[in-house]
Amino acid sequence: MKRILLLLVIVFSVEFVRAQAQSRVSLEANFGLNANFFVGSYDEDYSPAPVKTYLYKKNLLGTISGLELKYRYGRNANLFLAYARSTNKRARNFEGDFNGVNVYITDFNIRHNDDFFILGYERNFIKAKPAFRYHFGVTIMTSQQQEITLENYANEINIQERNSRNSGLMEGGVFGGFSYTKQIEKRFELGIKARVYYMVSLGSFEAVTLTPSVAYKF
């Protein structure tokens, strides 16, 4: 009998802990706009054509999407793990003689992707108004940068994608922002979020983002 009671206590305890954990966990998906400050910072006039032509720059505005797994910590705060990818691109064109060979590049999109791996903390601005929240944390960022270089004097055309694997493009930084959310159903929440990323290892701002979101509470 004691063993049965002990087994029942263990089962109910496990179920209670699981239920409590479920009520504290939520998963959020978001998608929106980013303004990436780095993608337009290339100096394409450093060695002007026809000696050398750089096709590096992308558009300032792009898209960003991500997932966030949140755990409610206390009554007014969340801890979260997140992943987000931003994409900035630009259609590039080139037409010219390259050591006797005609070279044409027509509306060729080159891209810059940033992958953010995030650990963050989120808290309500005011306890009585939990819809308004601020958040901050740390991030590791890896990048994939597509670039085209035409070097007439070296008789060379270089089309490449530099990334963390072949060029060590990995940076560490911090972020902060605020959000507004609205409960639309017992388990669903809609919101909008603004965030800014600063890369400490580079000493510069990387991006600002604005993303609508939808969250599901388990």
Image (cartoon, rainbow, N blue to C red):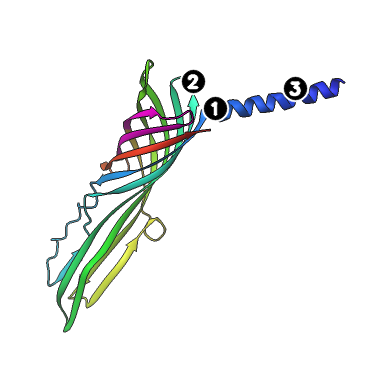
Q: Quadrant of the N terminus?
A: top right
Residue at figure coordinates x 56%, y 30% from the top left? 22
Residue 31: image quadrant is: top left
Question: Horizontal placement of 95 versus 133: left or right?
Answer: left
Residue type indicated by callout 2 = Gly
Residue at figure coordinates x 75%, y 22% from the top left? 9
For disc 2, the marked residue is 74
Check disc 1 and report its element: helix, strand or loop: helix
Check disc 2 and report its element: helix, strand or loop: loop
State which region is magenta: 177-197
- Residue placed furthest toward the right: 1
Identify the mark nearer the N-term, 1 or 2. 1
Check disc 3 and report its element: helix, strand or loop: helix
For disc 3, the marked residue is 9
Question: Which mark's residue is nearer the viewer, 2 or 3?
Answer: 3
Residue 200, horizontal then vertical, whole percent: 31, 40
- Residue placed furthest toward the top: 128
| Residues at discs 1 and 3 in contact (Cβ within 8 Å) | no
- Please say whether residue 187 is one of the residues in the magenta stretch: yes
Residue at figure coordinates x 63%, y 26% from the top left? 17
